[in-house]
Image (tube, rainbow, N blue to C red):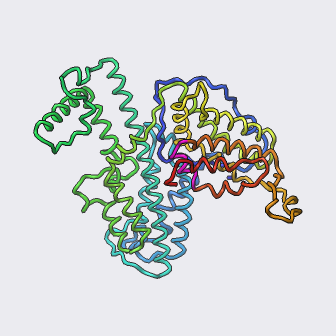
Amino acid sequence: DRDPQSSKPQVLYTRTWSKVVPEKSDLKASAAVSTGATLPVCTNGFVDLCEHILEGLGTLGGAVDNDGRPSLNVSPTYGQLELISAQIEMCDTLVDFGYYTENRDAIEVNFDQVQGLFAAVFNIVDTRGFKCYPSKRREALMLIALRSEALKLLIRMLNLRANYRISVMLDSWEHFFQTLQTAPLQPLSQVQAQPSFMMSFSVDTSADADTFALMTTYTAYLADRFAPFKDQFLTCVNRCFHNNIISSPELRADSYNPGEFNSDPIITSMINLMGFHDTQLTGQACALMMRHMAQRTRVTEDLKLVQVLVTPEAVKVYHETEYAIKVLTALKKHLSADRKEAYEEADILLKRLTTYISLAPDNLSEIVSQNQKIMLNRELDEPVVDLLRLNLERDLTKRAACTDESEVDADPPLNTQRRDLFQSCYDFLLMFCKGNASAQAKLFPLIGVFQDHVGIEKLNVADTICEIVRDNPRL
C-alpha cells in the first residue's frame, strides 16, 4: 500500500458537546484528491494484515516454555526474536494510524482486537515464575531490546484506555448537565452564611477543629447536590475502573486495588524485568508500573487538559481541522507529482486555517488560543510538517560563480510553486505556535528540518524559527 496515512492522536483532548450543531462550512470537497496520481492502495482497511499480525504475535514465532505454552523465557532463537520485533514494529504503526479500533473516540468503541493484542504483547514481557538476570549473549541482548519495544507499545495501548475513559466521563457529564438545567440547586453561598464555596478546595483538613467542621459542611453540601446522580456516578466509575477495557480478565490491567501489588500480574512482571539490570528497560517498566498503580490520578490529570467545544463556531473549526488533516495527507502524493491543482488546493486550505489562528477585530485572542488548542490536540501540525519534507532543490549556479562567500545571496529554488507552498506552511506554523508554549515545545525538535530551507530565495523560515523559541527560556 502506497497511500499516505495520518497518525491519530493517542489521547484526544478536544471534544465536542453532542448537542452543538456546527456552523455551516463553505469548504468544498477536494477535487485534486480524487483524480490522478494512481497508487496501489489497500481496499479492505488492512483487516487481513491486522489479523495476521495478531495471530503471529500470539504464537511468539514458535517460542515456547517447558510446558509448551508460547513464551520467551526459555531460550528463544535469534530468528524468532527478529520475527517478533518486526511484528511489533508493524503493529505499532497500525495502532498509530488508528487500526485495531474503529471510532476510538466513541462511547461504544469495540476493543475486542485490542484486548487480544494487549494479551499477546504482554506475554512478551511476562516473566512471572522465571528468574531474570543480566547476560551478554546475543539472544539475551536482542530479547531486552524487544521487550523495551513491547513496553512502548503497551503504553500506547494504555493511551487508548485513557482516551476511552475521557469519552465515558464526558458522556456522563452531559447527562448530569442536562438534569441540572431542569432542576437547578441553589449554591451553598445562598444556603448558608459561609465563605465562598470555591475556597474550600484550598482548605487544609489537618487544621483546627473549626476548619475541619467547615470542610464537613462543604462535603455534606456536595453529597446533597450530587445525590440525584448517585447511580450515574457509580455507573461511570464502574465503566472506567471495574470493567475490562483493553485487558483480559486474567491480567486485570484496567483496575488496581491498593495493597494487592503482590498478586497483581502487571506489577509482578514489571518488577521482575528490573532483574535484567538494563537502564532503559527498567525505566520503561517503572513507568508502566506507576501508570498502572495511578490510574485514577491519571484520569483526573487528563480531565484537566480536556477542551470541550460548546459553540457552533468552535465545532466548525474542529471539523475543518479534521478535514484539513485528511486532505493535506492525501494531497502529498499529488504534490510529489507536481500537479498544479494540488498546489492551489493545499495553499488555499493552509491560508484559511491560518486566518483562524491570526488576531483580527472579529477574531479575539481568546478565540485564537482556543483554535490553536483545537489544532494542537488534533495534531494538524504533523501533516503540515510532512509537506515540508518534500524535496526542494536549489539553483546553486549563483553561489558557484561567487568568489567571496560573504557576498553569497539566497539560492533561487528550482521549483517555485513548491517554494510558495512551503511559505504558506511556515506562515501557518508561525501563527500556530505564537504565544503557545505547548505548540512551541512540539515544534522545537523540528528546527533542524526547518533550517534546511534557510537561504532559499523568497522563503522566510527565520521568523517561524524565532517564534518557536520566543519568550520561552525553558526551550
**Magenta stretch: includes residue 440:** yes
Residue extending furthest toward the left? 209
Name the residue located 64 percent from the left edge and 35 percent from the top edge: 353
Q: Residue at x 59, y 24 (%)?
A: 362
- The x and y percentages for residue 120 are 44, 59
Question: Which residue is nearer to you in this view: 246 or 63?
Answer: 246
* Vertical position of residue 18 compared to residue 327: above or below: above
Q: Position of residue 298 (x, y in %)?
A: 36, 48
Name the one closer to the observer, 141 or 1: 141
Give the mark count. 0
The extreme top residue here reads: 182
| Residue 452 visible in the displayed image | yes
The rendered magenta stretch, by its main secondary structure, is classed as: helix
In the rendered image, the vertical position of residue 234 relative to residue 55, given as above or below: above
Question: What span is colored magenta in the figure?
Answer: 435-444
The image quadrant of residue 403 is bottom right
Residue 161 appears left or right of 326 = left
Q: Is residue 388 above or below residue 320?
A: below
Vertical arrangement, residue 18 with respect to residue 291, above or below: above
Pinpoint residue 381: horizontal percent, then vertical percent: 60, 45
Residue located at (57% from left, 44% from top): 433
Specify whether residue 249 is painted magenta: no
Do we see residue 38 in this rendering? no
Q: Choose between 391 and 187: the one closer to the eye.
A: 187
Horizontal and vertical percent for residue 431? 61, 40
Left-right relation of 144 to 6:
left
